[in-house]
């Protein structure tokens, strides 16, 4: 039975916190296990470096990312942290660390034409587990996408007017395999990460869906971690 994770804004029934208190965390990762209703797996927010938001937004252009997974929206318990080990030249490596600093897993993104292939390559390795490799989009759909490239301007305009944006994106599905078997999967419909392999740490899955969404759609300005405030 696969677990399905997706990232959404936290619903707000009231206005922002007042009296100088920090606003609650704005995004959450939901997890569903089979027929069981979705539950909150983690609350997610950026962890800002010295220099604050401007410094974070400047560094993210090289692929650097840093965010925290909280157990609750008021930051009372840290579940995990994603940190950047290295970033530059189209390749970025991240570690997902537990609350005590223990390694949960690693994620490596190699941008298309910068790493080892024509498609963006994602490598996910659980601590003490087997490396899994996935590529963004299927070759067939990328071929169709480039055939339609003369029409991309029209497609982008239509996507912006519709407010959806999916038509303006290239193929996005990713299947991570190890030993010929699918261990993880990102499905573009619904922006969900599916944990097919048993025993996967939900914190690694939550961090993965969150970091994938930071590379969502620069054209449409939808990356959750690129906000100016």
Image (cartoon, rainbow, N blue to C red):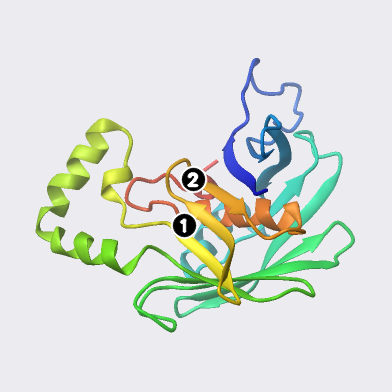
- Return the residue at label 1: 215
187 or 100, which lies in front?
Answer: 187
Look at the numbered disc 1 and give the secondary structure of its residue: loop
Q: Position of residue 121 (x, y in %)?
A: 47, 73
Q: Give the vertical position of 190 relative to 130 (above or below).
A: above
Residue extending farthest top: 14
Q: CA distance from mark 2 to mark 1?
A: 12 Å
Question: Answer yes or no: do the residues labelled 2 and 1 have beta carbons within 8 Å?
Answer: no
Any mark on residue 191, and which? 2
Side of 165 relative to 157 (left or right): right
Q: Residues within 10 Å of mark 1 (few under 14, many from 20)?
A: few
In this orientation, which residue lies closer to the viewer: 52 or 202? 202
Q: Residue at x 67, y 33 (%)?
A: 35
Q: Position of residue 104 (x, y in %)?
A: 78, 65
Q: Give me the residue at 81% from left, 50% from top.
A: 79
Ranked by sequence position, the earlier of labels 2 and 1 is 2
Question: Residue 115: x and y, percent?
Answer: 44, 82
Rendering quarter of residue 8: top right
Residue occupying the far left of the picture? 150
Q: Residue at x 50, y 63 (%)?
A: 175
Nearest the viewer among 20 and 107 is 107
Relative to residue 39, is residue 223 drawn left or right?
left
Which residue appears at 58% of the width and 42% of the height?
Answer: 6
For residue 180, which numbered disc appears in the image?
A: none
- Left or right position of 67 against 224: right
Can residue 187 be seen in the rendering of this structure? yes
Q: Residue 66, relative to residue 87: is it above or below?
A: above
Q: Secondary structure at mark 2?
A: loop
């Amino acid at each position: 039975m696969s677990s399905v994770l997706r990232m959404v804004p936290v619903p707000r029934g009231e206005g922002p916190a007042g009296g100088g208190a920090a606003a609650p965390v704005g995004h959450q990762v939901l997890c569903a296990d089979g027929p069981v209703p979705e539950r909150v797996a983690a609350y997610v927010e950026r962890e800002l470096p010295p220099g604050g938001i401007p410094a974070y937004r400047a560094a993210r252009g090289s692929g650097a990312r840093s965010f925290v997974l909280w157990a609750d929206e008021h930051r009372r318990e840290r579940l995990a942290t994603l940190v950047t080990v290295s970033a530059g030249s189209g390749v970025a490596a991240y570690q997902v660390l537990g609350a005590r600093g223990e390694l949960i897993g690693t994620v490596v993104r190699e941008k298309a034409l910068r790493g080892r292939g024509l498609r963006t390559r994602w490598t996910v390795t659980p601590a003490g587990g087997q490396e899994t490799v996935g590529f963004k989009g299927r070759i067939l759909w990328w071929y169709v996408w480039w055939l339609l490239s003369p029409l991309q301007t029209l497609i982008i305009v239509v996507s912006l007017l519709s407010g959806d944006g999916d038509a303006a994106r290239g193929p996005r599905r990713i299947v991570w395999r190890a030993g010929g078997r699918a261990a993880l999967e990102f499905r573009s419909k619904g922006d969900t990460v599916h944990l097919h392999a048993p025993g996967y740490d939900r914190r690694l899955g939550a961090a993965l869906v969150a970091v994938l969404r930071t590379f969502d759609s620069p054209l449409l300005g939808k990356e959750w971690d690129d906000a100016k405030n």
